[in-house]
Amino acid sequence: MPRILITGCSSGFGQAIAAQFLDQGWEVIATMRKPSFEGLPASDRLQVLPLDVTNPESIAAAIAGTGQIDALVNNAGVGMLNVLEGADMARARELFETNVLGAMAMTRAVMPAMRSRRSGVIVNISSSVTLRPLPALSIYSASKAALNAFTESFALEAAEFNVRARLVLPGSAPSTSFGRNAVARMGMDVPQAYGPFVQAYFQRLQSATEKTQARDVALAVWRAVTDETAPVMLPAGADAETWFRDAGLVNA
């Protein structure tokens, strides 16, 4: 029975991904900083483990207790909505520690065994904001663009050992706690000079008709893991698909 490890399963995308793979008969290791079964489906194929992707000891302990991992989904991530001048730079560093270095550390942890077996899939959850410039998201977009570049380059390395690396790019997902957490990470008030501009921009975001649901992300991850012909970069959600087309990308 194949086994998948998913980071960031306390809510939203992580829980939907876990449910998708449980429905398809996989063993699922759902990880999060503070372990909880809340929101996850009941199953004897589900294991919940503590994991902080920014802590090497936490990563080592989690990997040591899992057995063979056939697929890894680096879903753990944090967001930030603010203009650069209003951003708390300590929180900006936290963003890169989790969104980029955390995914790299998890990939390093599972790659030796996958390389030895010459099989495995690593899926990194990025964002469609990397496809077009948007205000008040410069730091978050930079972290996800770095994750994209890492994944595309690492995919070439991993392919030498029959290991696949893929990217899933969700669009805007108001049904998850991610956006609320991103606002909370403003860290300081938006500078007064930017106030009207940022307020109008947030209102436009909230009124958008095309939005991504957690289920869209789960299905995109399922394809990335199970379809060997899937491209390296996959959209998740109607808005992400629109942005892919606008960027001239083909979702093969």
Image (cartoon, rainbow, N blue to C red):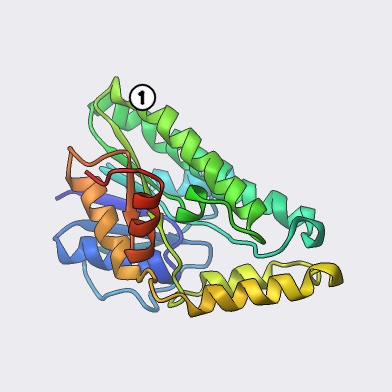
Q: Residue at x 37, y 68 (%)?
A: 212
| Image x and y of residue 130, in percent | 51, 49
In front of the other: 237 or 118: 237
Quadrant of residue 7 in the image? bottom left
Residue lying furthest top: 160
Residue 34 in sight from this viewpoint: yes
Q: Can residue 57 be seen in the rendering of this structure?
A: no
Q: In the structure shown, which secondary structural element does the residue marked by tag 1 occupy? A: helix
Specify the quadrant of the image occupied by residue 70: top left
The image shows residue 110 at horizontal and vertical percentages of 38, 37
Height in image: 13 above or below 199?
A: above
Q: Residues within 10 Å of mark 1 (few under 14, many from 20)?
A: few
In this picture, is 209 found above or below 167? below
Q: Position of residue 167 (x, y in %)?
A: 37, 45
Relative placement, left or right, of 125 versus 191 is: left
Q: Would you name the residue on which mark 1 appears?
A: 156
Q: Of 194 and 214, which appears nearest the observer?
A: 194
Q: How many marks?
A: 1
* Whether residue 62 is situated above or below residue 172 in the rendered picture: above
Residue plotted at (27% across, 39% down): 231
Q: Position of residue 91 (x, y in %)?
A: 72, 57
* Residue appearing at x 32%, y 38% in the figure: 232
Amino acid carrying label 1: it is Leu
Please identify the quadrant where the C terminus is shown: top left
- Quarter location, residue 189: bottom right
Residue extending furthest toward the right: 192
Q: Is residue 111 left or right of residue 79?
A: left
195 horizontally vs 9: left or right:
right
Instruction: Name the residue rendered at 35%, 71% in the picture.
Output: 213
